[in-house]
Structure formats: structure tokens, C-alpha cells
Image (cartoon, rainbow, N blue to C red):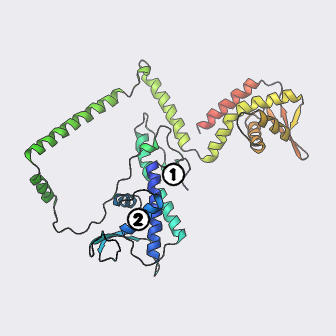
Amino acid sequence: AIPPGLSLPFHYRVLAEMFRCMDTVVAMLFNRSETPTFMKIKKGVQDMMHKRFEENHVGQIKTVFPEAYTLRQEKNIPTFNQSIKKGSYQLTVEPLDLSQVRPTLTATRLLERRHIFHHNLVSLVKRHHKAFLSSLAPPLSVPEDKLSRWHPRFNVDTVPPVPDSPLPQPPQTESLTTAQEVLDKARALMTPKMERALMSVALKSEKAETKDAAHCLTAQTPVALKGVSQSLLERIRAKEAQKLQAAMTRNPAQEERLLMMSRLSELARILRNVFVTEKKPALIMEVACNRMVSSYTSALSTGEMEKHIRLLAEVASDWLMIVPIRKDFYLKLKKNMELSVVQDQLRTRLKEEERL
């Protein structure tokens, strides 16, 4: 399963939806022994998504999931579209990975293919994320199988679109077989003036890229950090990199525990006030939960509050105790222990677990 923290860019999600619609249309045509052509698929996908669907999108799908289809250029395929000349070539799409005598694409298989496509999209984003981590100072290295969320400064929507793979093209009457023939033909169509203009544009682009690279190198050290020792900066960056690496490989259970621990300092203060207000040496768990729920700023249920109290008793066991008596649980506080000491312990423990 893909961790929920590994979200996809918007254009990747659109492409995943295009694949879902395309696979649905292909399955419908293929299962009734009708040849799936691009024109039929295009109309079906556009009717389902209300978005344009072109051949370059098929090329992108081929890049992400090359094993999904066999693509061919075939002619003499029956069509009721007057814009397609009779006997002309059409792009056909045949689903792969079918081993039955008369194979069919079932709903289960369609769902499996969607999961494969989504997994492949996440793998593409991971490559860009890995390149981003290696460009940091200091560079980070996180195993892909342990990655559960992207780096906070990695803007996932800046990931470039999926490149489209070449599709089969209909045979051409005039074919250029070698690279030299292509070059000769291009030069024959180009005037000397055009050639000089292209050379000038290329030189200007090269100078602009060199200038941008130099600017980036000088901008790496902010003005506010001028005068700070390089060794101190490196230690700070290494510590920050270690913290970010731990955050990117943290599983959802650890994330939930850290979120709960971040609330404990405030909840300890509220629990202390409840004991002062009630003027009792011990409180029943249910009573304490109800009082704390009404005093806490965020919306927590009594069940969630009980989980926080039990975690508080685990982390600050020398201050809060949970005592089972018959069918109830009672809370007891160590009165001679300062609340500020408890809160310092909680903050220290939170920092320690954030580094794990």
C-alpha cells in the first residue's frame, strides 16, 4: 500500500483518472470483441472526464505503464466516422496480460491495473524527490521503501509532466532511414540566414544559463548568515537534515503518537486545574475526561481524551498514576511535584521521539 503522505501532483492525478477511463473503455470494447481504436477511446474518455484526451496522453500512459497495452497501426477497420477515410490506418489498443483462451478484462483486473498505474506514478515522483534530496546541503538519502512522506520543502506540484513515449505511426511513402539523411534534408530546407539566427539564439541561451548558475551559487548563503562560522552552519544543517529524514520515514502510528504527545503539555496543565477545582485526592477517569474535554481548545471526544491521559501517565509516570479499583480507573497526582518540571519533561521527551 502507498502511504497517504506520498501525495501525487495534480497533473499526475489527472493522468491516473485518464488511465482509469481509458482502461474502462478499452475493456468494454475488447470484452465484446470489438477492436478498440483511438478514436473510439478518445470519445469515451472525453465523455467520462469532460476533458480533452489526445494521443500524447496515450504516450504518457505508455511511459508510466508500458505493459498495459499493445499499440499498433492497422487499416481496414470498420468505422462509422466519416472523417476517417476508408482503408486508412488507425491506432489500435489491445490490453496485455491476458492469458485465457478468450480473455476478458474483469472489474477486479481493472482495479489491479489502476493500482499498478498509481504505484508507478509514485515511483516517478520518488525519482524527482531523490534528486531534490541529493541537492540539499547537506544532502539527504532516504530508502524508498521506508519513505512515508515528502520533504517539507519539496513542492510536489513542481514535478515536471510525464514524458510521452512514441506511438506507432502509419507507414510513410517517403522514409528517411539514417540520421545523415534527416540532417541533409533539414539543411536543404534551411537558408544561411536562418542557420546564423539559430546559432545566435543558441549562444545567447548558453550565456544566460551560465549567468543563472553563477547567481544560484552566490545566493546559497543568505545575507543574514554572513559572519556565522561555517562549522556551526554545517552542524545546524546536519541536525535539521537528520530531523527531516526521521520525519520522512515515520510511519502513521508514530505520527499519531507524536501528535498526541504535542498536546500533553497543555493537557497536563488542564488536568492539574481540574484536580485543584475538584479538591479531591483522586478522580475517576470518566469525570476527569469530561472536565478536560470541556476545557481543551481542540475538539476531542472522551475516548480520545482517555487515550491522551493514558499516554500522559506513561510518559510522566512519576507525576500521574492510574489506579484500577474494582471496575473503575482513578487518577492520582503527585502534589509536591511542580507542573513546570513535568512540562519540561514532556517537551524533552517529545524532542527525543521526533529524532527517532
Q: Which residue is mark 1?
A: 145
Query: For this view, does 343 lie left or right of residue 286?
Result: left
Q: Residue at x 34, y 58 (%)?
A: 56
Q: Is residue 242 above or below residue 98?
A: above
- Amino acid type at circle 2 is Lys
In this rendering, the label closer to the viewer, 2 or 1 = 2
Q: Is residue 263 left or right of residue 250?
A: right
Q: Residue furthest right?
A: 326
Q: CA distance from mark 2 to mark 1?
A: 39 Å
Hey, which residue is sitting farthest top in the picture?
A: 227
User: Disc 1 on helix, strand or loop?
Assistant: helix
The picture quadrant where one finds residue 54 is: bottom left
Is residue 222 visible in this depiction of the protein?
yes
Quadrant location of the N terminus? Answer: bottom right
Residue pictured at 73% horizontal, 40% vertical: 300
Q: Nearer the viewer, residue 309 or 43?
A: 43
Identify the residue position indicated by label 2 in the image.
43
Amino acid of disc 1: Asp
Residue 323 lies, with reference to residue 126, above or below; the image says above
Q: Position of residue 83 (x, y in %)?
A: 30, 68
**Looking at the picture, does residue 145 appear above or below residue 229?**
below
